[in-house]
Amino acid sequence: MDTFTRQIQLRWSDLDPNLHVRHSVYYDWAAFARLAWLAECGFDTATMQQLQIGPILFREEAVFRKEIRLEDKLLIYVELVKTKRDYSRWTIRHRIVKEGDQLCATVTVDGAWIDIAKRKLTQPPPAVGEAFLRMPQAPEFQWSE
């Protein structure tokens, strides 16, 4: 997969009193895009419940570059920055872009998989690794140990 994008629909409730996008909204958009990617790869919430696994985050970081206005047309790109070879831990970046090429913000997350029954970190089933192989990779993608 070369790219994975989702259009973002900006809502009035996403804005703060200064008419800027509230900082927490960027994290919501990133979660929406990540879960959309997982669902498109066959891992919707029902499937993850059956497999007794779920993604968890250790770190979330947003970097804000350009102001977003209510009328802007936005896309969010999802790309894999780093992963262990067993796909148990990973770093995913989300780039929020307006007007086709203006980078407005990046949200980077470090995460892993948890066994939801045991409440412990786990290695995901092989099908998850196969899906991660199809995730668009950042130019600086690297395998981690």
Image (tube, rainbow, N blue to C red):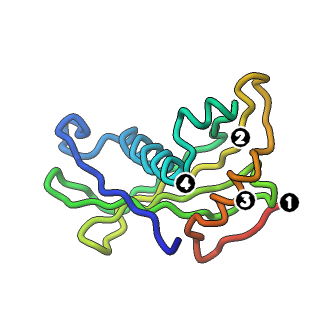
Label at residue 113 = 2
- Image x and y of residue 96, in percent: 38, 60
Give the x, y percent position of residue 118.
79, 23
Q: Are marks 3 and 1 in contact (CB under 8 Å)?
A: no
Please, what is the three-letter code of the amino acid marked with disc 2?
Answer: Trp
**Mark 1 residue type:** Glu
Q: Is residue 110 above or below residue 137?
A: above
Label 1 element class: loop
The CA span between labels 3 and 1 is: 8 Å
Q: Residues within 10 Å of mark 4 (few under 14, many from 20)?
A: some
Give the residue number, with chain letter if any, for mark 4: 41
* Residue beneath the point at 39% across and 46% down: 29
Q: Label 4 is placed on what type of residue?
A: Cys
Q: Earlier in the sequence, mark 4 or mark 1?
A: 4
**Alpha carbon distance from label 2 to label 4:** 16 Å
Residue 83 disc label: 3
